[in-house]
Image (cartoon, rainbow, N blue to C red):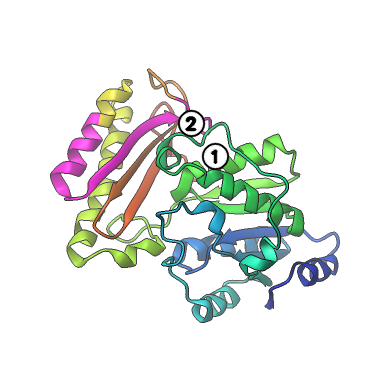
Amino acid sequence: MKVIRSIDQLQRELLKFNKQTIGYVPTMGFFHEGHLSLMNTAREETDLVVASIFVNPLQFGPNEDYEQYPRDEERDLKLAKENGVDVLFMPDVGVMYPDKASITMKVVKRANVLCGRSRPGHFDGVVTVLTKLFNMIQPDKVYFGMKDAQQVAVVDGLITDLNFPIKLVGLPTIREDNGLAKSSRNVRLSKEEVFEAQSLYRALIRGQQLVVDGEKDPATIIQDVKQTIRHHTDGKIDYVELLSYPALEEITIINEQIILAIAVQFKHARLIDNLVFNKFGQIIERLR
């Protein structure tokens, strides 16, 4: 595995692999099993696996946790090598943003719902850094976990609108045995909160089962999910939403592919989770 920190060196290295398919896994590091599953799938489906680690300051708001975002470079290097990464790109902020930008990007659809509603500008930062990375790496496939399904939807819009010749692959959320979605932020949960947090997935499954049983009213499902979370956790609900997917638009009846998504704030960690399923309640495990 080659570890590269400059753009010029990255592009020189990738030129050596002309006509080989590139699978790209963009990350902010502090790897868990979700990241590793993306790397392993990319290894199975493409010739060359490129991963990046970059904690992107543009996607953090003024009161968010950029400086406190967990980092462990030595561990990440070891895990990337063990899980089939050929090239690991690890630029610093000065490499990615050497000067003040003369062009800015703004997401106008799919961003002002779910997490994007309380994080103005977040997805503008996401699409800015991804556009730069896509242009540098020119991958054939890019891999994301469905835990952050809104991000996947925004990236789908980016690839479509800017005509990137890239196939977007959304892979299933990796979960603990108790159903809790794996996340770098889980380390901030107390022992009691870890126990409570397993109820988030159970609440989603309850909502999905209602659709399986024939419920078509989004409001009924949302209310049931909220009641389950409130009954089993002390976390503060940020949102419970049921929207079309990937368009992320409000619906009045369930008659298309949808996402049931939640965000709950615990003392030191805000957890998100979701399920994507069709109008019959059948879960969509993988996009494309």
Q: Residue 61: x, y in percent?
A: 46, 51
Q: Residue 92: x, y in percent?
A: 63, 69
167 drawn magenta:
no
Q: Which residue is mark 2?
A: 248
Residue contact between numbered discs 1 and 2, judged by CB atoms under 8 Å: yes
Examine the rendered structure and indicate whether residue 81 appears above or below residue 242. below
SS of the residue at dot 2?
Answer: loop
Disc 2 residue type?
A: Leu
Question: Dividing the image into 4 quarters, which one contains the C terminus?
Answer: top right
193 on left or right of 90: left
Name the residue nearer the viewer: 43 or 140: 140
Q: Is residue 286 visible?
A: no
> Which quadrant holds residue 182?
bottom left
SS of the residue at dot 1?
Answer: helix
Examine the rendered structure and indicate whether residue 75 appears above or below residue 121. below
Disc 1 residue type?
A: Ala
Q: Which residues are magenta?
A: 223-249
Q: Residue 189: x, y in percent?
A: 27, 63
Q: Which residue is mark 1?
A: 153
265 on left or right of 33: left
Q: Residues within 10 Å of mark 1 (few under 14, many from 20)?
A: many
Tell me which residue sits at (28%, 31%) in the image.
222
> Which quadrant holds residue 133?
bottom right
Q: Residues within 10 Å of mark 2 (few under 14, many from 20)?
A: many
